[in-house]
Image (cartoon, helix red, strand yellow):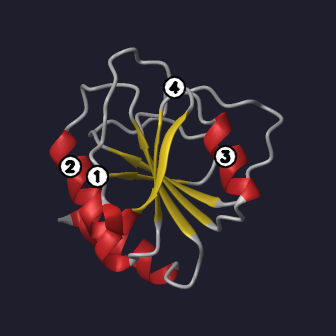
Amino acid sequence: MRWQRELLKIMQNNRDKKLALVIDTSSNQTDHQVIENVIKFVGEMNPEATLIQADFKIRSIDKIKKTPAIKYYSHGKSSYTEVFEWANAEEIETLMYVTDVTGFLYDELEVKPFVYWLIPDQYKPKVPFGKLLNVV
């Protein structure tokens, strides 16, 4: 229940901001139920949020209220660069990224939105910027 309280605070603090939720689809080894719970929670709190599915490239961009099926891959290749470039271009203010933080990020890339790294596991990896929240 702790992560739900923390996510609720994040959503309340960002209710008037342009928000996107990104699901890292590069691995099918994550707990899909946890990810579905995060999508549902964010969708209820902000039905205008954008849902992005990405691995080494963006696979789909939809409104979260449509809640498309998430397609996972097993290649393990992940890059955050294209997502952050998209977020910068779309003037996203808050980006929540469900990932294991093992993806590539171009060093010189300017990241404009504030990023919450939502980790669907118990471990606490080092994040390059933003804030980490375990969602298990």
To which quarter of the image does residue 41 belong? Answer: bottom left
Residue denoted by label 3: 84
Q: Residue at x 20, y 41 (%)?
A: 32
Q: Residue at x 24, y 25 (%)?
A: 29
Residue denoted by label 2: 34
Residue denoted by label 4: 78
**Which amino acid lies under the numbered mark 1 shown in the image of this protein?**
Val
Indicate which disc, 2 or 4, sits on the residue closer to the N terminus.
2
Disc 1 to disc 2: CB gap under 8 Å: yes
Q: Position of residue 113 (x, y in %)?
A: 67, 60
Q: CA distance from mark 2 to mark 3?
A: 23 Å
Front-most of 56 and 31? 56
Indicate which disc, 3 or 1, sits on the residue closer to the N terminus.
3
Residue 115 sits above or below residue 107 on the image: below
Tell me the crowding category of disc 2: few under 14, some 14 to 19, or many 20 or more residues within 10 angstroms, Cα based.
some
As helix, strand or loop, the secondary structure at mark 3 comes to: helix
As helix, strand or loop, the secondary structure at mark 1 comes to: loop
**Which amino acid lies under the numbered mark 3 shown in the image of this protein?**
Phe
Disc 3 to disc 1: CB gap under 8 Å: no
Front-most of 85 and 95? 85
Q: CA distance from mark 1 to mark 2?
A: 7 Å
Q: Which mark is residue 135?
A: 1
Indicate which disc, 4 or 3, sits on the residue closer to the N terminus.
4
